[in-house]
Image (cartoon, rainbow, N blue to C red):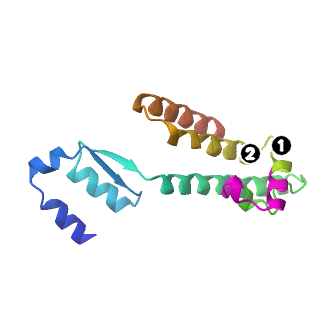
């Protein structure tokens, strides 16, 4: 990290201002350095880390819902379903596919979070910044509605 910071600080002010785009992961030290040295640049987060964050969110929702359903005496419909929500559909085993299809019929927060993650895949197809931004705003709004 120190060598990266030293390298970036070695750029002249003019060179720093010419940087328009930066692609990084979501490691907080990277984000802080980028914001400090290139405040005018658009920081583009990589796809892998965004999907990782979406999967983490789904798993948190699933764990909370498993706990809530158990406390309220409902049948454990989410039991053994963790990887059904986290894997890409084409990587699911036959039993995971069946389990996922069975659980998708329920009106659960986990199902809504999963469907939100799946619909987010369309984001990567946009070539227009305007429509990508529009789509992203809709996704953020939907995410907040699901959490509520």
Measuring from the top left, give residue 70's x and y in whole percent.
84, 57
Measuring from the top left, give residue 119's x and y in whole percent.
62, 40
Which residue is located at x 74 percent, y 45 percent?
Answer: 111
User: Which SS class for mark 1?
Assistant: loop
Measuring from the top left, give residue 102's x and y in whole percent.
86, 49
Q: Which residue is mark 2?
A: 111
Q: Is residue 23 left or right of residue 115?
A: left
Q: Is residue 141 left or right of residue 77?
A: left
Question: Which label was assigned to residue 106?
Answer: 1
Q: Is residue 80 left or right of residue 143?
A: right
Which residue is located at x 43 percent, y 53 percent?
Answer: 46
**Which residue range is magenta in the image?**
85-100
Q: Check the picture and name the quadrant holding the N terminus.
A: bottom left
Residue 93 belongs to magenta span: yes
The correct choice, above or below, for 147 with respect to 84 in the image is above
**Most frequent secondary structure within the magenta stretch:** helix
First in sequence: mark 1 vs mark 2: 1
Which residue is located at x 66 percent, y 57 percent?
Answer: 86
Other residues around mark 2 within 10 Å, as few (<14) / some (14–19) / many (≥20): many
User: Which SS class for mark 2?
Assistant: helix
Pick the residue in front: 39 or 118: 118
Which residue is located at x 77 percent, y 58 percent?
Answer: 67
Number of numbered discs on residues: 2
Give yes or no for contact between labels 1 and 2 (Cβ–Cβ under 8 Å): yes
Dividing the picture into quarters, in which one does residue 10 lie? bottom left
- Between marks 1 and 2, how big is the CA–CA gap? 7 Å
Measuring from the top left, give residue 93's x and y in whole percent.
78, 62
Q: Check the picture and name the quadrant holding the C terminus.
A: top right
Pick the residue in front: 39 or 70: 39
């Amino acid at each position: 990290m120190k060598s990266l910071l030293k390298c970036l600080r070695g750029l002249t002010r003019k060179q720093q201002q010419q940087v328009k785009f930066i692609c990084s992961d979501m490691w907080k030290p990277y984000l802080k350095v980028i914001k400090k040295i290139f405040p005018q640049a658009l920081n583009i987060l990589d796809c892998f880390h965004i999907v990782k964050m979406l999967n983490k969110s789904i798993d948190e929702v699933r764990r909370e819902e498993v706990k809530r359903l158990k406390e309220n005496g409902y049948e454990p419909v989410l039991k053994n379903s963790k990887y059904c929500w986290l894997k890409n559909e084409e990587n699911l085993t036959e039993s995971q596919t069946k389990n996922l299809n069975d659980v998708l019929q329920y009106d659960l927060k986990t199902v809504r979070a999963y469907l939100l993650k799946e619909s987010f895949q369309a984001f990567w197809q946009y070539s227009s910044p305007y429509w990508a931004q529009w789509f992203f705003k809709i996704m953020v709004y939907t995410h907040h509605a699901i959490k509520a």
